Image (cartoon, rainbow, N blue to C red):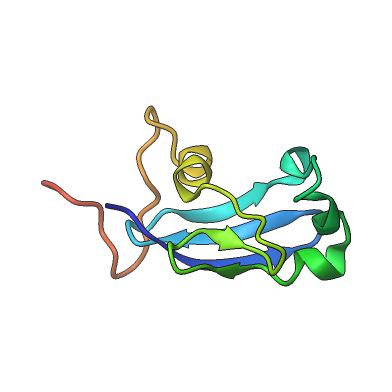
């Protein structure tokens, strides 16, 4: 199972993400920040408080969180192979 290993807030409500399978990149989550639990995240200082919770999801102190599998799918759709990174080759025959 692929795990989210790093999350970092970037300007413009973007998250930089790294996954255990080598997939990494930025995702714009601004369209997801609606509803009462996500309203505080519209403040960029609060948005910057993102951290990985005990389940490996990006989360904030107020309990807001995002699904890592959905974020992974945005970075590596099924029709596109995962990004290779040094020291983290794709599984399977090369």
29 up-or-down from 58: above or below: above
Query: In the image, 92: left or right of 59?
Result: left
The residue positioned 81% from the left and 46% from the top of the image is 36
The residue positioned 61% from the left and 62% from the top of the image is 59
Query: In the image, 28: left or right of 91?
Result: right
Q: In terms of image quadrants, where is residue 48?
A: bottom right
Q: Nearer the viewer, residue 46 or 24?
A: 46
Q: Nearer the viewer, residue 73 or 79?
A: 73
Query: In the image, 18: left or right of 40?
Result: left
Which residue reaches farthest top? 79
Q: Nearer the viewer, residue 28 or 82?
A: 28
Which residue reaches farthest left? 93
Q: In terms of image quadrants, where is residue 17?
A: bottom right
Which residue reaches farthest right? 43
Query: Residue 21: x, y in percent?
Result: 32, 56
Query: Residue 12: x, y in percent?
Result: 82, 54
Total label count?
Answer: 0
The residue positioned 77% from the left and 63% from the top of the image is 47
Query: Residue 66: x, y in percent?
Result: 58, 50
The residue positioned 35% from the left and 55% from the top of the image is 84
């Amino acid at each position: 199972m692929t795990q989210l290993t790093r999350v970092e807030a970037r300007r413009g409500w973007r998250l930089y993400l790294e996954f255990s399978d080598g997939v990494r990149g930025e995702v714009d989550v601004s369209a997801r920040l609606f509803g009462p639990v996500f309203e505080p995240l519209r403040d960029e200082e609060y948005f910057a408080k993102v951290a990985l919770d005990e389940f490996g999801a990006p989360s904030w102190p107020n309990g807001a969180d995002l699904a890592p599998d959905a974020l992974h799918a945005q970075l590596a759709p099924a029709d596109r192979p995962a990004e290779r990174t040094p020291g983290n080759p794709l599984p399977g025959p090369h």
